[in-house]
Image (cartoon, rainbow, N blue to C red):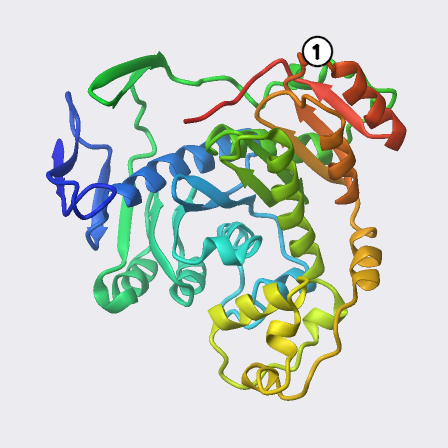
Amino acid sequence: MNELALKYGCNPNQKPSRVFMNEGELPFEVLNGRPGYINFLDALNSWQLVKELKAATGMPAAASFKHVSPAGAAIGLPLSETLKQIYWVADAPLPLTPIACAYARARGADRMSSYGDFIALSDTCDESTARLINREVSDGVIAPDYTPEALEILKAKRKGTYNVIKMDPNYRPEPIERKQCFGVVFEQGRNEVDLADPALFENIPTQNKNFPEEAKRDLMIALITLKYTQSNSVCYVKDGQAIGIGAGQQSRIHCTRLAGNKSDIWWLRQHPKVMNLPWVEKIRRADRDNTIDIYISEDHEDVLADGVWQQFFTEKPEVLTMEEKKAWIAQNTNVALGSDAFFPFGDNIERAHKSGVQYIAQAGGSVRDDHVIDTCDKYGIAMAFTGVRLFHH
């Protein structure tokens, strides 16, 4: 099959719509559902990300995509008991396989943004992973294959309409890519830069030149994630997973702040007060996620006010104070940070430092590189100039 008609394009008024190949057959098969235009954009972008993560790290990888940018990306390292709790997988019906761990990390990092996502898996989707996917609100999944048990579970999801795509792992696109804008055709070579190249970390202008292997791995994950994130973009990574992604901002500092705020929220969700919130029985997962997000924000009274907290809790929780939040965030360390282009000012480093960043990989080349380097030296941060820009549009 070299063509697939779609219901409509980005919006219902944009008809006709289709995906097709000029030559050869489509490199995927729709096993269930009826994916739409944006679904396929998410699927194909996220597939590239997880395939590259798997090649770079040698570990199963997963991504959670929304509107053509990742909300989360991760490799399949085992989960701590704390992460199992904050990702709501402590009660998983089956042992978590490596690909299930990768999915739980990718989906759990930014649960608010991942609501209604499209999932990509680098490896065969097994029953353990399918059971985790089955209880989340999601539009679909793309993977190189599915076990019979997993496929049965996914086909039954969303009253039988859940989108399941099987991707040909051997597919290689043409080296030149094209797209249209306002009737004008754009053409460029595909971005085939090797982000697993050790040479990326050879130019280290900071006083601290120590990059442990785990830090290099996390920086690779950050850069590969950014390669498929709408620019401008910045990505915070810790222990094999993205914990904060700032995508599509016009200002670099706004990317750094947005991603930093997301990573702070990820860390605050592990605070004892948050982990011990007294939930009412049978609260919906989405309501629980939204309530946590508000509880740890400055708008906490929106869920703690009299007459409101009873909807979510069996008893009124104590406020998580600003002092407690600052003290807890200060305990987060060894965070890696990647940027899809150079940092123009040291204010980005100042903001990154507040969220525990100790390792940075960025392109370099700003007229104020000296100021950025000095700010890193001020905090003992190790920074590499990769010389590689990763704009994606």
Residue at x 75% of width, y 31% of height: 347
Report whether 377 appears left or right of 386.
right
Image quadrant holding the C terminus, namely top left
Name which residue type carries label 1.
Val
Q: Is residue 276 above or below residue 179?
A: below
Note whether 124 is above or below 220 in the view shown: below
Q: Quadrant of residue 150?
A: bottom left
Q: Is residue 389 above or below residue 327?
A: above
Please provide percent x and percent y for residue 30. Answer: 21, 47
User: What residue is drawn where x is 60% and y is 63%?
Assistant: 293
Q: Position of residue 356 (x, y in %)?
A: 78, 43
Locate the N terminus by quadrant. top left
Q: In the image, what residue occupies the spot 65% across and 78% down?
A: 304
Residue 176, by quadrant, is: top left
Note whether residue 8 is visible. yes
371 to the left or right of 124 = right
Secondary structure type for disc 1? loop
Percent x, y of residue 272: 76, 69
Q: Quadrant of residue 383?
A: top right
Where in the figure is residue 333, as x and y percent of width and height? Answer: 79, 45
- Residue 280 vertical placement versus 124 (above, below): below
In percent of the image, x 54 and y 72: which residue is there?
A: 288
Give the residue number, with chain letter if any, for mark 1: 367
* Total numbered labels: 1
Question: Mark 1 packing: few (<14 Cα in 10 Å), some, or many (20+)?
Answer: few
